[in-house]
Image (cartoon, rainbow, N blue to C red):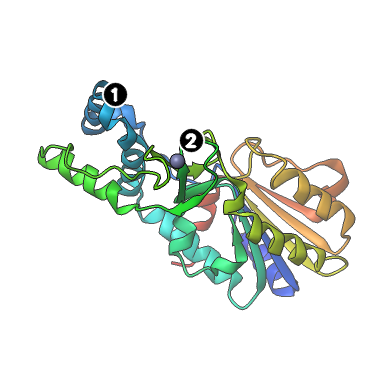
Amino acid sequence: MEEIRTILIEKIKEADLVLVGIGEEFEENMPKMEGTPMFSQALRMMEEKKELMWMMPYLKKAYEDLHRTDQTEKAYKALEVLLKDKNYFIVSTRMDDYIYHTSLMEEKIVTPCGGYRFSHCEDETHKKLYESDVRISEKIYGFFAEGASLDSIQRPFCPECGKDLVFNRIEYAGYMEEGYLAQWDKYTKWLQGTVNRKLCILELGVGMRFPTVIRWPFEKVVFFNQKANIFRIHSKLYQLTEEIKDRGYKVEKKPMDFLANWFV
Ligand SMILES: [Zn+2]
């Protein structure tokens, strides 16, 4: 593994531009929420009490935040070190928004599957994005943990019709692409600028959940740009196609294990 890391550092150093893809495997192993006694109890309560059902996505966020260890932080830190002073762009299908809490530049990141940052009305005809109040997440968890009643927690609602606001994530109905299109536009322009230039691609845990967003387009970029290299890091789907394997490096590893504890 040390050898491939050395090559990666070298290739990034040589490159004019670095393109990073972050996929679904870029996450920590977390036990299932349903299998955690306190959370499963909270979930049951929200399922049974119709007026508390809106809280479930917020509880899910609280669960993720609480169970994240410093492995995530260390993995992103390694990425920050690798990309320091480089001209880079990051496409991530992660929806946990953690990347926006790192020192990676927001204007160099696009998250086309959405996340927790924005919400929209559950009525799909009310096409408007609102900034989410994610603090509600901690509040719900805190109240539940203390045994306090959740009834007093104010439900975020659509100012137009009063219905529930839902997080703007691809998994929920009414997903609004407007949440990322401006950044996507910047990304495609940046990508046009990579033509015929030394490009290093780092693909971290990108599987087949959304292959048209990162995996396949990245392969195409490497295929057409003879000066491009690709590092594909994935525990199972690390294989490279015939056309690009001469300029590719595959690492059979979970991306977090590959990155964390590297520089720190
Ligand atoms: Zn509405």
Viewer-proximal residue among 41 and 50:
50
* Residue at screen point 36% across, 40% down: 162
Q: Quadrant of residue 73?
A: bottom left
Badge 2 local density, few (<14 within 10 Å), some, or many (20+)? some
Label 2 CB-ligand 1 distance < 8 A:
yes
Say how many tags the image has: 2
* Residue at screen point 76% across, 65% down: 189
User: Which residue bears the numbered disc 2?
Assistant: 123
Badge 1 local density, few (<14 within 10 Å), some, or many (20+)? some
Q: Is residue 109 left or right of residue 195?
A: left
Disc 2 element: loop
- Residue 104: x percent and y percent? 53, 68
Mark nearest the camera among 2 and 1 is 2
Quadrant where the N terminus sits is bottom right
The picture quadrant for ligand 1 comes to top left
Viewer-proximal residue among 224 and 106:
106
Q: Quadrant of residue 89?
A: bottom right
Q: Furthest residue to the front? A: 160
Query: 63 above or below 11?
Result: above
User: Which residue bears the numbered disc 1?
Assistant: 47
Q: Is residue 4 visible?
A: no
- The amino acid type, in three-letter code, at marker 1 is Glu
The dot on residue 108 is none
Q: Furthest residue to the left? A: 147
- The amino acid type, in three-letter code, at marker 2 is Asp
* Residue at screen point 31% across, 39% down: 59
- Residue 57: x percent and y percent? 37, 38
Query: 50 above or below 204?
Result: above
